[in-house]
Amino acid sequence: MASSLSVTGLNAGYGAVRVLEDVSLSVEPGQTVVLLGTNGNGKSTLMKCVMGIVPTTAGTIVAEIDGERHDLVGRSTEAIVDLGISLVPEGRRLFPKLTVEENLLLGAFRPLARTAIAQNLDSSYETFPVLRERRRQLAGSLSGGEQQMLALARALMSAPKILLIDEPSVGLAPVLVKRTIEKIKELKDRYQLTVLMAEQNFIQAVRIADRGYVIVHGKIAFEGGSADELNNNELVRKFYLGL
């Protein structure tokens, strides 16, 4: 059963600095929704709010998983992961002095995932064959593209229903960005995931997006009901396409 995510009237920040103001967005079951914005506009903060890492000051965050509604505000990050929500953080945040396989096993902390560690590990290696080859190599010695694969695979080790992906293109060469975006679509289809992806590479992001939002200075400036609407929006054309 597909899962969904809904954010309504969200305010959040750091101390006296407000980063998000009255942010509302939704990700319907089985969709890939892209949150577009340049650096410093609140994309990562929104992701961290969903995961319970940054507290909110107003608004609601609701996930529906396997037909059951869950209010995420006030829950711990561990409890949110246990529900079946996983984050691939910006910058990958791997454990560089642990091996590839050790990093993957740490992704299986969720109780439900522990019962299928061997199966999920095999699936990760099948999806990313290079990780099988590098499984005893230290994560910090991998290339940028390989590290991004590992970060994605580690998130999948928790057997999530909703996957949040924060800036997957950061630090990657253009050809690797294209491959990474294509792999995200492949994973979404294979595992029947619901995906919210924060990204500033507009051209690559809209290739796999069902629809999306543009966030500017912590507020949703535009909601596109389709990739075509995003492509044809004046705000997007000005800030992302230089037209």
Image (cartoon, rainbow, N blue to C red):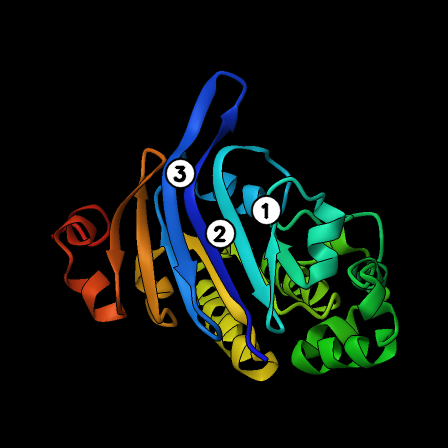
The residue drawn where x is 46% and y is 68% is 181
Whole-Å distance between the Cαs marked 2 and 1? 8 Å
* Numbered label attached to residue 167: 2
Give the total number of marks visible in the rendering. Answer: 3
| Element marked by disc 1 | loop
* Numbered label attached to residue 154: none
Q: In front: 68, or 219? A: 68
Residue type marked 2: Glu
Q: In front: 59, or 221? A: 59
Q: In front: 94, or 171? A: 94
Describe residue 213's horizontal placement relative to residue 54 as left or right: left
| Element marked by disc 3 | loop
Q: Can residue 200 be seen from the camera position used here?
A: no
Q: Can residue 212 be seen from the camera position used here?
A: yes
Whole-Å distance between the Cαs marked 2 and 3? 10 Å
- Tell me, yes or no, whether the two marked residues, 2 and 1, touch with CB atoms within 8 Å: yes
The residue drawn where x is 44% and y is 43% is 43
The residue drawn where x is 73% and y is 81% is 123
Picture layout, residue 101 above or below residue 48 = below
Residue type marked 3: Asn
Q: Which residue is mark 1?
A: 91
Q: Quadrant of residue 209?
A: bottom left
Residue 138 location (% of width, % of height): 81, 56
Picture layout, residue 18 above or below residue 50 = above
| Element marked by disc 2 | loop
- Tell me, yes or no, whether the two marked residues, 2 and 3, touch with CB atoms within 8 Å: no
Residue 217 location (% of width, % of height): 32, 33
* Numbered label attached to residue 39: 3
Whole-Å distance between the Cαs marked 3 and 1? 13 Å
Residue type marked 1: Gly
Describe residue 56's horizontal placement relative to residue 216 as left or right: right
